[in-house]
Amino acid sequence: RSVEAAREVLRLDPANSDGHHMLASYYAVHDFDWAKAEHHFDRALELNPHSLWAYHSKTIYLLDPLGRLEEAVESQHRALAIDPLAPAVLANLALVLEGLHREEEEEEVIHRVTRMDPNFVGGQWTLVRLRARQGRVAEAVELAERLVQKAGRWGMTLGALGAAYAAAGRVDEARQVVAELGLEHNRHSRAFY
């Protein structure tokens, strides 16, 4: 339905930045039509260069999946220039830096977001991932278990928990988390976590 609404908005007002942003997100996430997604993200940002969420969505739905990580860093920095305290943007910047193997910068960003809001799931999720990669698996497991306890059992928290268990060699528990996520029979999941 949202795609029809976005198309209708653009039919009525072709210069509507939000309509382009929504259509771009749809093309990227649902159709994997990267050319159309990029066209509409670029148009949305041309029409409204102060759209934090268009920059953020372009990063997570287009630039990250295509491996255009340096562009993704630049896009997240543009979003942070609009709102330097946006926790979702900071957490995603940490993920991009992870992909670039820039661990020191990644850790700085994660600490920034977790200091601002120690209960923000995205910040805790990125911290679990970092600790697991650093071999600090006991800490990763403790953080992930606390995250699930505080924020509930859903995709992002369970993703952190499963990754921490796997890193700690707790295979049976990691498999239980995968089963809970419903991924064992869906190897082609579009889940981001």
Image (cartoon, rainbow, N blue to C red):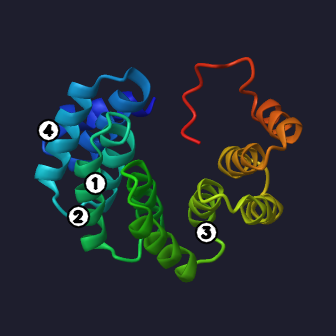
Measure the C-alpha gap from mark 1 to mark 4: 19 Å
Sequence-wise, which precedes: disc 1 or disc 2?
1
Position of residue 169 measured from the top left corner of the image (x, y, whole percent): 80, 44
Label 3 crowd (10 A; few <14 / some 14-19 / many >=20): some
> What kind of residue is marked 3?
Phe
The residue pinned by badge 2 equals 78
Task: Identify the residue shown where x is 22% and y is 49%.
Answer: 71
Q: Can residue 143 be seen in this view?
A: yes
The residue pinned by badge 4 equals 14
> What kind of residue is marked 1?
Tyr
Sequence-wise, which precedes: disc 2 or disc 4?
4
The residue pinned by badge 1 equals 55
> What kind of residue is marked 2?
Arg
Label 4 crowd (10 A; few <14 / some 14-19 / many >=20): few
Q: Residue 189: which quarter of the image?
A: top right
Task: Identify the residue shown where x is 69% and y is 46%.
Answer: 163
Q: Mark 1 and mark 2 in contact? Answer it, CB < 8 Å.
A: yes
Q: Residue 6: which quarter of the image?
A: top left
**Image height of 110 relative to 7, above or below:** below
The residue pinned by badge 3 equals 120
The quarter in which the C terminus is drawn is top right
Task: Identify the residue shown where x is 84% and y is 44%.
Answer: 170
Sequence-wise, which precedes: disc 1 or disc 4?
4
